Image (cartoon, rainbow, N blue to C red):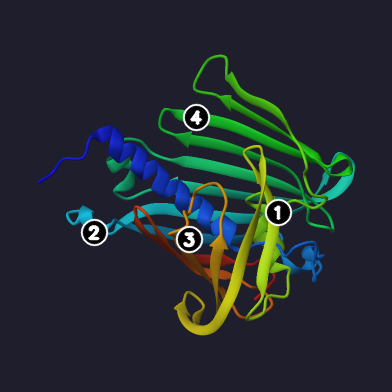
């Protein structure tokens, strides 16, 4: 049986779980320059929690490796806050490896994200990331200045003492209403998704601004944690950052109701197939 070098296994596993964390965040995309069609304060109950089990099917040439539980993704709408004297909303997310993945990678993954968005426009003000992937430990902060059409990107290697500065740069040509990876999930749920729509948005991550397009393909029935229900199947046809190459595909199924709850996702990538399903949904005070 062929042996894969440990360092190659580690890099592959980290990238796969990174895909797990990012592809779902990319799915629910904001629509152009549209304003949210719902009152976000009422639509997202404070404390709404979405938890997903993520798995990975290796490519065919990994015939000796079965489907692997990669980890768990959790999203929380923390609710309204005040940010620098102005009303805003706070969102958080975490990606934690589990199952066989940490052993395969040689290290555990515990990443956390926090997004602050302006209220009521739901445009990103700042996003922070704490990346903890074995020896790779990064603190990242993105801030956006809507009035001047620019942002600021900072990155530090916190595995060093004191932390080493990796990036500290200006981000130019930022749209008036830009999304970060986390805010995009919620912003899209405020839109009127319909079959045949092309969903577009601008997002800034790691110091660059890119455009993403998602198509709302069709309606299907899906067995989910909510029972058997009607869902909308979406397909990502343009994803930034090299997460999905031109040969990759990404599908996400969202509930076909006003909540637009993401219930399932699947991505075919060069290193096999990543898929996940909602295993817990909590909406305090809501059905």
Q: CA distance from mark 1 to mark 4?
A: 27 Å
Label 1 crowd bin: few (<14), some (14–19), many (20+), radius 10 Å: many
In the image: residue 175, left or right of residue 164:
right
Identify the disc placed on residue 79.
none
Q: Secondary structure at mark 1?
A: strand
Mark 1 or mark 3: which is in front? 1
For image coordinates 28% across by 42% down, the residue present is 104
In the image: residue 235, left or right of residue 40:
left
Rendered location of residue 77, percent (x, y): 67, 56
What residue does disc 2 label? 60
242, 219: nearer the viewer: 242
Residue 42 quadrant: bottom right
What residue does disc 4 label? 137
Q: Secondary structure at mark 4?
A: strand
Q: Quadrant of the C terminus?
A: bottom right
Residue 230 visible at all: no
Q: CA distance from mark 4 to mark 2?
A: 32 Å
Pick whichever of labels 1 and 4 is earlier in the sequence.
Answer: 4
CB under 8 Å between callouts 1 and 4? no
Rendered location of residue 75, percent (x, y): 58, 55
Pick whichever of labels 4 and 3 is earlier in the sequence.
Answer: 3
Identify the disc placed on residue 52.
3
Pick whichever of labels 4 and 2 is earlier in the sequence.
Answer: 2
Q: Is residue 107 above or below residue 13?
A: above
Q: Is residue 119 above or below residue 149?
A: below
Label 3 crowd bin: few (<14), some (14–19), many (20+), radius 10 Å: many
């Amino acid at each position: 049986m062929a042996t894969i070098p440990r360092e190659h296994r580690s890099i592959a596993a980290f990238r796969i779980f990174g895909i797990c964390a990012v592809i779902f965040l990319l799915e629910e995309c904001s629509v152009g320059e549209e304003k949210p069609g719902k009152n976000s304060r009422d639509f997202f109950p404070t404390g709404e929690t979405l938890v997903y089990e993520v798995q990975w099917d290796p490519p065919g040439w990994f015939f000796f490796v079965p489907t692997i539980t990669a980890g768990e993704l959790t999203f929380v709408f923390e609710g309204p806050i005040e940010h620098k004297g102005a009303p805003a909303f706070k969102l958080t997310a975490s990606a934690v490896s589990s199952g066989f993945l940490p052993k395969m990678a040689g290290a555990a993954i515990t990443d956390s994200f926090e997004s602050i968005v302006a209220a009521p426009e739901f445009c990103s003000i700042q996003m922070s990331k704490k990346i903890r992937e074995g020896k790779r430990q990064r603190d990242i902060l993105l801030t956006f200045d809507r009035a001047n059409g620019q942002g600021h990107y900072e990155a530090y290697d916190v595995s060093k003492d004191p932390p080493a500065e990796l990036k500290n740069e200006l981000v130019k040509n930022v749209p008036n209403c830009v999304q970060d990876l986390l805010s995009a999930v919620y912003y899209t749920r405020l839109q009127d998704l319909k079959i045949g729509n092309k969903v577009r948005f601008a997002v800034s991550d790691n110091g660059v601004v890119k455009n993403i397009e998602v198509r709302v393909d069709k309606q299907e029935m899906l067995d989910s944690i909510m029972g058997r229900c009607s869902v909308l199947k979406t397909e990502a046809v343009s994803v930034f950052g090299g997460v999905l190459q031109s040969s990759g595909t990404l599908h996400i199924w969202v509930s076909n109701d006003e909540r637009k709850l993401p219930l399932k996702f699947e991505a075919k990538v060069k290193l096999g197939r990543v898929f996940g399903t909602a295993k817990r949904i909590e909406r305090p005070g809501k059905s």
